[in-house]
Amino acid sequence: MKEFIEQFTREKLFDENDILKLRSEFYLVQPELATILRKTKHQTSFIGIYLGKKKKNFIPSSYLLEKLAKHTKNKVSVNDKGAWMFICGKHIYARSITEFNPQQKFNDLILVLNKHNECLGYGKMINRFDSKKVAVQNIFDIGDFVRRERKN
Amino acid sequence: MEKGMNFFLNRYKQLGETVKSVGIRQTFRVNTLNIAEKALISRLNSLGVEVSKIPFNKYGYYIDKSRFSLGAIKEYLLGYYYLQGAASQIPVEILNPKKKELVLDCCASPGGKTSQISQWMNNEGIVVALEKQKQRIPALKNNLERMGCYNVIVFHMDAIKADRLNLKFDKVLLDAPCSGNFVTEPNWFGKHRNINTIKNRAELQRDLLTACLSVLKKDGIIVYSTCSLEPEENELNMQWMLDNFKVNLEKINIIGDKGLTNVFGKKLNKQIENCKRFWPNKTRTEGFFVAKVRKL
């Protein structure tokens, strides 16, 4: 998780003492919840703020993405059509991008925001933002909630 | 064997109700943890979705018109609302969990009511959510993440064993596993449902009520609800509670009929009138029963 966050910001977002790792999942645990967990002496399945999961790659939670969006310049804003395509799992064409950071480099990880500044996921810059090609390759988007529901 | 549509419809008639099937409207609850109510309604309107307020829910809306499903759009994915029946929003409204309280949600998955409890508490205090079936936990976690719930601990545990947590709760929600009702299940009157399956459910519900009372603080509240219309799972369970524990049934001020106090000729405690029974043809909701129990 730490390496994932560092690709967006060098700022320290969380106190590491407040982070609990449950199998492959990371949680930010407030002291009151930690106290309850200690009292129960039981294994929990979910506690506090879910931050993400380490599979082959790290899969961030929607909370972590929103948090990162406030602390990074690695982000683009997209129009409605681009936003819709992105949450359907598609890549972002340069023409859908309405705002970007001109200092962004190829292979940078980039958050994708809609016109309301809501973070919809993230991807990798693979082409220039003024090209006619796919500029951001989708790695993770919030449409995953529905895909997960279908899997369950 | 006592089963089949005629058997159950006759029972409802004996309870004073000629029950007909009704179409119920799709509804949702605005999640004020993630968005202001007005802002969401305005966004849905701008997408061409027409909604109207449910008069008896705090944050509930009917979906009057929509060209697309509201179960996959961006606003749904961002956890701005939860698709939740009008009646099923009521138990948490009655429980009225407050900031700083320790609340137990006994049969939590898929998390509609758990996330509603978090919303009422504004993510302060603690919600302990129990789910017995392991395969239902991913859906619960998924919904807690989507809805921005930060004060919840989930345990894979049968609520009957809740005392093993070594905790005493201010409030408990027991939305009990039940036989369901014919409005939400098209084949409800099918061959597998009979009076014995109803009685088995009622027995399990009593075990759960006993477990809930054992982990509830004195003067604490249990809200008990089912989406069943069968008195064995509702009023008769409440009578059993009054007979066996030091509890009171508190008055609920919301739509719906009073709890029945004459069930198939058996006279029940007058306090049971304080419960609410939702006959679908009257409330235009799924069938439902809710009781507010105070431990003395």
Image (spheres, rainbow, N blue to C red):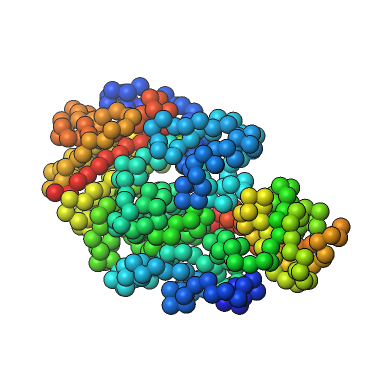
Q: Is residue B12 visible?
A: yes
Q: Quadrant of the N terminus of chain B?
A: top left
Q: Where does the image place residue B256, in percent across and percent down from the top left?
A: 32, 29
**Relative to A150, does residue B229 appear above or below in the rendering?**
above
Q: Is residue A61 in view?
A: no
Vertical relation: A57 (above or below) B34: below
- The image shows residue B247, relative to residue A109, as above or below, that is above
Q: Nearer the viewer, residue B50 or B172?
A: B50
- Position of B258 compared to A61: left or right? left
**Foreground pick, B55 / A54:** B55
Q: Nearer the viewer, residue A58 or B265?
A: A58
Q: Estimate the x, y position of residue B44 in percent, counting from the top left.
A: 59, 38
Q: Is residue A85 left or right of residue A28?
A: right
Rendered residue at 86%/60% (across/down): A131
Q: Is residue B154 left or right of residue B238?
A: right
Residue drawn at (49%, 28%) of the image: B23
**Mark count:** 0
Question: Quadrant location of residue B164?
Answer: bottom left
Q: Residue at x 28, y 48 (%)?
A: B205
Q: Residue at x 51, y 35 (%)?
A: B26
Q: Nearer the viewer, residue B229 or A116?
A: A116
In the rendered image, residue B208, in percent from the top left (x then y), is placed at: 27, 53
Q: Residue furthest right?
A: A132
